[in-house]
Structures are given as C-alpha cells and as structure tokens.
Amino acid sequence: MSTDTTQTRDGDDAYLRRMQSEKDHFDREYRNHGHDEVLVQHVPPVWQLLEQKVEQLIRAETGGFFLQDYIAQIMNPRTAPRMISLASGPCGLELDIAGNLHGDYEIVCVDINQGLLDRGLDQARRKGLHLTARVADCNRLELEEGGYDVVMAFASLHHFVDLEQIFPRIARALRPGGVFVTMDISSRNGYLMWDETLATVRAIWSLLPDRLKINHTRFLKPTLTPDYENVDYGDNSFECVRSQDILGQLDRHFDPVHYVSYYAFCRRFFDPMYGPNYDLNRPLDKAVVELAWALDQAALSEARLPPETFFGVFRPAGELAGPAVDERRVRLRRDIHSLNRCLAASTSSGVSRSWVQKIRKRLRSIMK
C-alpha cells in the first residue's frame, strides 16, 4: 500500500476556495467515526429503508447483483484485475468491495483529501486488503489508458466540473470488456429542485405535521422550516456543480449495460436533513414513506419528473448493441428528455454557468 501525493491545482481563487470547502465538509462528516467503524456517512433509519428499496430495483436490473457483488463478479474471474475509484473519500465502499475479491487484485482510491484516504488505507492495512491511494483532483486526473477492469465513481460525478473531458478519459482507461460503474446525483445544478419537483415537494410538505419539518443539517440546531426552501448548495462548493449535465454526457460517451433511475423527489424528505424526524414504528410516518416512494416511482415511469439519482453500468460508446442495450438507452433518454423539459421551463439558472465555463477552460489549458 502506498500514497502517491500530487498537487491538486493552483490558480483560480474561487476554485481553490471551493476545493477547501469540499475538504472541510467531508472532514466534518467523518470526524466522529471510530477507528474500526465502517467508513460511510451516517444516515437515519428511514434513509436505510429507502436504500433497501433501491437495492431491490438494482438487483432486479442486474440479475441479482448489487454494486459490491456486481463489481466482484466482474473482477474475480480476471487475472490481476485493477479498479480505480474516483473521489473515493475514506474508501469505505472500496474496502467493502475488496473484501469480496480474491487473488492478485488492486483497488486505487483517488481523492483530494489526504486525511480521508489515510483512514481507508489504515483499515485496509489491518485487514490485509489491497488498496492504494492517490491524492489528486479528478478534474485534471490523467488515467492510464487500458489500465483498469473497473472504473467507479460513487456519489462523486456531481462534484466534477469538466465532464466532457473526464468521461472520455474513463472510456479510454477501460480494458477490453471493462466497465464504468456509478451511482450518483442527477438533480438540477446546485442541488436545486426543478420548478415541477419543487411544486410536488411543497404540495406534500403542506400536508405533513410540523414534527416532520425539522431541519437537522442546515442550521446550528434542529429548526422547524414551515416552508420547504429551494437552496443552492453549490454556491460556495462543488456540490452538484454540473449534476444536471451528467446523464446527457453519459449518453454521449457510453453505452448502458445497466441503468436504474430513482428518487424523483422523495430523497428531499428522508435524507439526513429531514430523515431523523421519521419514526418507522409510527404508522403515519411509515405511511408517508410508502406513499412518497410509490408516487416517486410513478412520476419517473410516466416521465412526469426527472430522476435526482441513478445507478448505471456503462461501456464505451459503440461497443454494445442489441435489444437489451436499446431498451436501457430508451430509459436513459426518457430521463434526459424529462430533465431537458424542466430545464426549458425553469425560472432561474442556479449555479453560475459563466463560472463553470471559466473553470472548464482553465482545466483544459492545464491538461494540454
């Protein structure tokens, strides 16, 4: 196990401020994790329930596999398989995947935060797992061509600025038959809600009791929020900086092996912001969850709202053909169409597009 330390980047002050904001945020997220604790973010029980529902959707799509065992069944039959994880944080998921692998494998974890990587490497060392780490900014990261059987981006694409360059690098990095695996956020930029999504959330919000409207993350202490606010969380960070562009860029650069979209709106009620309010032993709380999930699934299947989250397995564009790929591409493009419809009808632009364009140009000049 080793750590290859490289510079992130220098230059643009706004970029560096956002970079530091990212580091500070995730340092806080994992500050209270114990020495041997699983290195994943703490979530409320209601979120765990929703994730179980998502897992069922994904297993139905992949023939019984979830993310960890899907990657294992790709890597284990191969000789000296390699995987790279982009913006891995403390490598919690990667440790779980490594526990399902055997033989002479390698998992490379890339992140901007040395401290988080060190946490993951420490656990890997004590468990005898084959993880290495590289400190780098994924926006300017060059990937070894043909170097990996699996490239993974778990909840990280929505922090990346230059998708038009990152996705071709990922495609070139895959070995023959290799796959790009991702679970990520595809919401409006800044984690804002589209007008139609916001209207849906506020309609449900108006019916909920006040005890389910306590915000646990935005303020210094839990605070009642009578009205659901549409907040731009990308104002001073990379949070969802180009999340609304992810699906379109995936469709441009890859063929879908598997694709599942979910959470048209219901994550807004049950994630760590409002999820701690829900007691699943209370009939009303459980009923709200089940109704929201059912409405969410209907909104997606009828293309009434675009998804805010998705799971996908992809191969480079042009490598796959056939009815199964076509069917998954239809579902992906249905979601892109829903997103574009909301974009055309939107009343505000969200995260500054001029800033994003400026940073993309700077990154490309550095990569030349």
Image (cartoon, grey):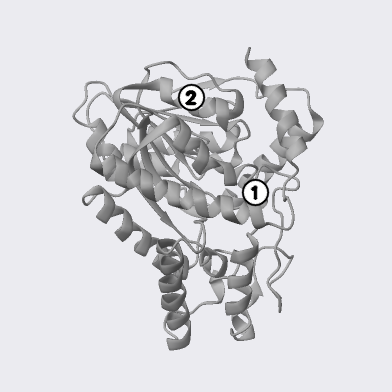
Q: Amino acid at mark 1?
A: Asn
Q: Earlier in the sequence, mark 1 or mark 2?
A: 2
Quarter of the view holding residue 92: top left
User: Residue 89: image x %, image y %?
Assistant: 53, 40
Label 2 crowd (10 A; few <14 / some 14-19 / many >=20): some
Q: Is residue 38 visible?
A: no
User: Residue 341: image x %, image y %?
Assistant: 58, 54
Q: Kindly identify the residue that appears in the image at 74 percent across and 55 percent down.
A: 348
Is 211 located above or below residue 273 in the figure? below
Q: Nearer the viewer, residue 233 or 215?
A: 233
Q: Write down the residue under mark 2.
A: 168
Q: Write down the residue under mark 1.
A: 189
User: Residue 235: image x %, image y %?
Assistant: 75, 48
Q: Is residue 366 visible?
A: yes
Q: Is residue 163 left or right of residue 150?
A: right
Disc 1 element: helix
Assign the N terminus to one quadrant of the image: top left
Q: Kindly identify the residue that appears in the image at 25 percent across and 56 percent down.
A: 60
Quarter of the view holding residue 362: top right
Assign the C terminus to one quadrant of the image: top right
Q: Amino acid at mark 2?
A: Pro
User: Residue 114: image x %, image y %?
Assistant: 59, 32
Q: Nearer the viewer, residue 241 or 249?
A: 249
Q: Kindly identify the residue that appears in the image at 24 percent across and 37 percent down.
A: 322
Q: Does the CB distance between marks 1 and 2 fall below 8 Å?
A: no
Gap in angstroms between the C-alphas marked 1 and 2: 22 Å
Q: Kindly identify the residue that appears in the image at 72 percent across and 46 percent down.
A: 351
Determine the residue located farthest toward the left in the rendered image: 77
Q: Is residue 69 left or right of residue 37?
A: left
